[in-house]
Image (cartoon, helix red, strand yellow):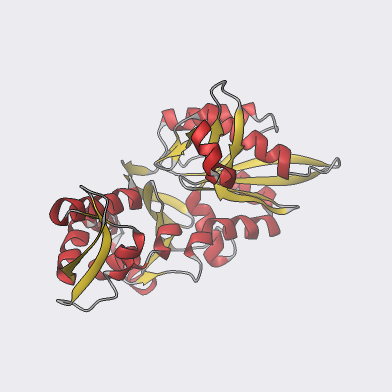
Amino acid sequence: MKRDFLFFDLGTETLRIFSAQNGLIFHGPSRVAYNENGDVTGYGSEVDDSQLLDRNSVIYPIRNGNVANHHALLDLLKLIIKDAYKKSITSRVVPVFSISPFSTNVEQRALMYVADALELGRVLFIPEYVFQVSSIFGKPGIQGLEFLIQTGIGRIDICLVNDSRLIYGETLKGGFEKIQKKIIRFLRADWDIDVGKKTLNAMFEAKEDEEIIINGRSKMTGEPVSVEIKQTYFQSIVKMESAPLMEAMRRVFERIPPDLTAEFLEKGIRVSGGPVNEPWFLNAIKRESDFRINITDTPGEDILNGFRRIAEGDCEKIVSEYSFLPWGAEVNR
């Protein structure tokens, strides 16, 4: 009997499920709506319907890159599989979950509960960096040192990998979302203005010392307002709020063996994840880092592309070699 590897990428903001035989079967918001009786009334992009929002409670099952509500996640995955996945009668499903290599025991147990309750058979867990390496090189198992950063809305993982095995890493809970909220909070406090993401992107398009006209709404009255702010004001806030990420990157760099430093300096840091598509965030990493930064054309799709490449290759070998977590790795949470 053939095997169909069913890959799950449980993002804080976006959920993706990919079948080795059928391709992408779901790519949408990670959320589910319930009515007052506890019945599911919608999931994914269906939850954007304003009438649905008025009459229902919306649950976000993933927070900070991990399971926050395992019951809601189970409901969500079951509905997607029921509605979108066409299982062949001649195939056996092998669920494969992409997970952070820094998940705690509590986080792992929540995911195991969901995986077991899906009743799809033996479930495999593979650290995200394996798919990141697969996306870059076409397969894991690459010989040599790699410094990898997987950015996310809810967490940022920094991995030092040698021969595709994690040797040291750090994780920052809150990730991109935390940095973004802090910057918006400063604008509210200092200028009495509420702004959106377009403002954060516009601030890096201006030259240093240039006055930027910011359009938003007064946090007190809700009325439209405009203020002029120097670009250096934004730079100082971004530098301060991105400091923990830069410090973590440098701590990981210090763990590189001296004989491999030259290899790192030649390769640089490989950064993946959806937030890298935000110009202000990418510019912050490039501006504040002393290291060479390498990014693919579609950083938000790196994990999914890794899924695809593994599905096209020797799935059996890969899942047997990389399933579950590298317990021996040194990790700083």
Q: Residue 216, located in which quarter of the rendered image?
A: bottom left
Quadrant containing the C terminus is: top left
Residue 259's x, y, as percent?
32, 65
From the viewer's perspective, tell me whether residue 155 is left or right of residue 186: right
Residue drawn at 33 percent across, 63 percent down: 281
Q: Quadrant of the N terminus?
A: top right
Near-viewer residue (243 or 125): 243
Figure check: 85 above or below 228 = above
Q: Residue at x 63, y 26 (%)?
A: 117
Q: Nearer the viewer, residue 225 or 20?
A: 225
Question: Where 39 sits versus 16, above or below?
Answer: above
Question: x, y (%) of residue 262?
Answer: 32, 71
Q: Quick one: 135 or 41, which is closer to the camera?
A: 41
Q: Specify whether residue 151 is in view.
A: yes
Indicate the quadrant where residue 184 lies.
bottom left
Look at 53% across and 46% down and name the residue there: 48
Which residue sits furthest top? 37
Q: Position of residue 288 (x, y in %)?
A: 23, 66
Residue 313 seen by the camera: no
**From what the image shows, is residue 96 above or below residue 106?**
below
Labels in figure, total: 0
Viewer-side residue, 331 vs 217: 217
> Residue 179, percent across and down?
28, 52
The residue most toward the right is 90
